[in-house]
Image (cartoon, rainbow, N blue to C red):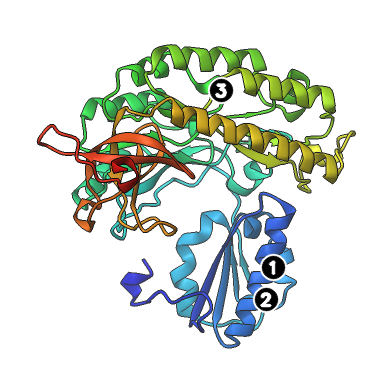
Amino acid sequence: MLKDQGLEKVELHERADVYIVNTCTVTSKTDSEARQLIRRLRRTGPGSVIIVTGCYAQVYPERIKELGCVDYILGNPDKARIIECIRAGRTSEGRLIVSDFEGGTPLTLRIRRPSARTRVNLKVQDGCNRSCSYCIIPRARGKSKSLPIADVLEEIETLIEQGVKEFVLTGIHLGGYGPDLTPPMDITGLVRTIEERGYPARFRISSLDPDELTDELIEVLSSARTICPHLHLPLQSGDDKILRLMRRPYTAGLFRQKVSSLLESVRDIAIGVDIMVGFPGEGEREFLTSVRLLEELPISYMHIFPYSKRSGTVATNLPGQVDGKTVRQRVARLKELDREKRLSFCRASVGSVRKVIVESTRDKKTGLLCGRTENYIPTLLDGDDTLMGKEVMVRLTGPAPSGMRGMVYEKTEAFKETSREAAG
Ligand code: SF4
């Protein structure tokens, strides 16, 4: 939309006519980072129009207005009014345009220009109907809203024509996809429909709560040709008492059962896990219960989040807040376990042949081509730029610092030794 208005993107440190700050409010730290950035931008561009939007603007617009240097504060449902604000120009004081989510805003945001990327995030859902006790998102994003399936398919087809090879289906709470549509749908139906279309692209599901992973979805994944064998499951804690305090609607036992079903049914699947450390009430015993569960299950990697107090959430006032030193020690312990999990998942795939979509930029550290396998292993390859954006068959030769090294498998049916390391 901005390009259509004749605007051009400049670097953040440059003076611009307009700055648009899309904020996050997931922790108090992100709020403070947003405030710092806004002040810095005003110093860089004393005469610029500054527009602040996103979740912090939605939940705490007055706090942004108090900074005294912002022209417009737009809520999440109001982002489409950015152009109107740019046209109106500077204001003497911050103008608040923050709608609530009553009735839900239709989800229509589209990506039409993937800027030469081979992989794009396709946002099919926004908002959340759950109320996890640590999370501010329902206040920042409102009730769950889904992109109608016909729009999803149209978007996929348009982007495939533009050269996109991989889609990541995303949402604020992706597992909440569908019930608001007419006729109602669910995430399994969406994934099944995409798979049945047999598109010349591959698809990843970004994240699903464990209780939303149905047997039907596991069945779709087990025989899928275009849906990647990769799932990310936010466990958050492996202790049932903590899960209850978090208001997460599943138990550690259910999580274990889902992971086992996935491993039994979906060949080579990579399972990533989110885990939160230091939630109020997490003593040594509860933490060790989580560690044991994670140690036992052959998951592929973890994303570890230290719990951080978020004002406006139920968890802020819970007893048993964990001190910072203990949280850091627990994070360090889990990071070690994460390293072991990643390494053992990679080791188990040495010698296997996988499809890798080569990214359009080279790995910054090594200058090698890079991409990911269907089961999400970062892979480094020798080769020239003509491979960029292509899907190639690759034999994985051995672990690299953050993934695997691989050799491109040529159409001649012979493996070409393209890795100097492997040749040695
Ligand atoms: S399901 Fe996710 S987005 Fe929704 S309240 Fe819980 S943590 Fe927040």
Q: Quadrant of ligand 1?
A: top right
**364 displayed left or right of 61:** left
Image quarter of the C terminus: top left
**204 displayed left or right of 353:** right
Percent position of residue 66, x then y: 75, 71
Place residue 96 in its image quadrant. Answer: bottom right
- Going from N to C along the chain, the mark reached first, 3 or 1, is 1
Considering the numbered disc 3 on the image, is that residue within a helix, a strand or a loop?
Answer: helix
Q: What residue is drawn where x is 34% and y is 33%?
A: 374
Separation (CA) of disc 3 from disc 2: 41 Å
- Going from N to C along the chain, the mark reached first, 3 or 2, is 2
| Disc 1 + disc 2, Cβ < 8 Å | yes
- Extreme left residue here? 412
Considering the numbered disc 2 on the image, is that residue within a helix, a strand or a loop?
Answer: helix
Place residue 228 in its image quadrant. Answer: top left
Q: Which residue is mark 3?
A: 210
Q: Which residue is mark 2?
A: 39
Q: What residue is drawn where x is 25% and y is 46%?
A: 418
Separation (CA) of disc 3 from disc 1: 35 Å
